[in-house]
Image: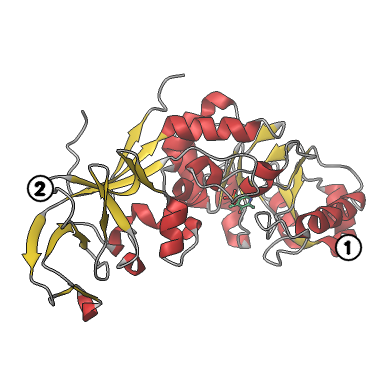
Amino acid sequence: MPMRLTRGWMEVDLDAVVRNARAMATRVPAILPMVKADAYGVGAVRVARALERLDPWGYGVATVEEGRELRDAEIARPIVLFTSVNAEELPAVRDARLTPALASEAAIERWARIGGGAWHLPIDTGMSRSGVCWSEIRALSPTLLEHPPEGAFTHFHSAALDDGTQGEQEARFERALAELSAMPRLLHTENSAALARNAHSRWNVGRPGIFLYGVGSGDRAQLEPEPVVSVRARIVELRTVAAGESVSYDATFRAGRETRIATLPVGYADGYRRALGNRAYAIIAGRRAPVIGVVTMDMTMLDVTDVHAEIGDIATLIGSDGGEDVDIARIAEWASASPYELLTGLHARLPRHYRGGEAG
Ligand SMILES: *Cc1c(COP(=O)(O)O)cnc(C)c1O
C-alpha cells in the first residue's frame, strides 16, 4: 500500500487506458495519443509510459512545456505540438525535439532557418481555429515545395454529432491535399469520436484523446471506453439537523425532515463543481447519498439519513462502488459542463493514485 488515502483522491486505472488505446488502435494503422493538458488531468508522463508498450507513432501535446516534460521522462517518440506558437517559441520547440504544426509561410521558413526538423501542416476545414484554410493551400505551394511537411492533418468540429459535417470537412481536406506537390507521409484527421464511429480509417494515423481516459462519445459510437478515473473522499464530519434547517451557502437546500449530513473534505477547488449541489449523488457502500446544498470550495455535504455512514468511510463521487456508479459524462451533465472540462479540472488539488501500467 503506498500512502494512506486520506481526504480525497483520484484513482487512475492505467491498464484501462491501455485497453482503451488498444480499442482505438484497431481502427487506424497507427495512433498518436493526445496527452495534452497533462493527459486531460490524468497524468501525461504516467499515461505515455503505460502506452509505450502499444508502440504508438507518437504523442500529441498543446504546449512546449508539456512536450519537454515528456522528453524529460525519456519519451523518445515524435511529439506533435498541435497548438500554434509564436515565432519566438520556435527555438524552444526545436530544442525539445518537438514536431510543430506550422500554419504560415513565415513560420515554415523560420523553422527551416533555425534547423528545425519534421513538422506537420494543419489544414483548417471548418473549425476556424488554427491552420491554413483548405481553399488557400495553393498560395503556400512554393514554400511547401521547398520545405515539405512530414504530415498534414485537419480537425473535426462535430465528430460526435453525426450531422454530416465530418464528410464535408474530409472532402475539403482531400481537395487541399490534391493541391500539394507531394503527398505528406502522414495524414490524420480523427479524434476519439470519429474513431469510435468509423470501423476503418481512411488515413494512416488517428488522434484519440478523451476515449483513452474513459469518456465515450454518445449512443451512435460503436466503441465504448472502459472507465479510467474514480474520485473518492473520506467523511470527516457527521451531524443531524432538524427539519427546516438549511445547508451550505445561500441556503439552497432546506431539510424537509430531520436530516443526517455527512461532510466530505473536497469541493470545487478539487474540480467537484459547485453546480453539482442538489443534483448529483455520491455512493457510500453501494448506496446513493444525494449532494445537498451548493458544493463549497473545500467541502461537500451529503444527505446520509438513509445510508449507513461513519466518520472515515469512503464516498465515491465519480466511479463505481457496490453496483452503483456515477460516470464522468453524467457528472458533467449535472454540472452543465463538458466532460472534457470536468475531467481536466479534477486534478488541480486531488492527489492521483495509479493502478497498473507498469508491466511491459
Ligand atoms: C484534443 C485534440 C484531439 C483529441 O480529441 P478528443 O475529442 O479528446 O479525442 C485530436 N486532435 C486535436 C488537434 C486535438 O486538439
Residue corresponding to mark 1: 139
The percent position of residue 17, horizontal first and vertical second, equals 48, 35
User: Which of the 4 image quarters holds residue 186?
Assistant: top right
The mark found on residue 301 in the picture is none
Viewer-nearest residue: 54 or 22 = 22
Relative horizontal placement of residue 131, taking residue 19 as reference (left or right): right
Earlier in the chain: of badge 2 and badge 1, it is 1
Q: Residue at x 62, y 39 (%)?
A: 32
Q: Secondary structure at mark 1?
A: helix
Residue lying at 68% horizontally and 54% vertically, measured from the top left:
159
Q: Amino acid at mark 2?
A: Glu
Q: Is residue 217 above or below residue 104?
A: above
Answer with left or right where residue 321 lies relative to residue 65: left
User: In the rendering, at what x and y percent does residue 202 appear?
Assistant: 80, 39
Type of amino acid under label 1: Ala
Quadrant in the picture for the N terminus: top left
Q: How has the structure been colored for display?
A: secondary structure
User: Label 2, on which residue?
Assistant: 310
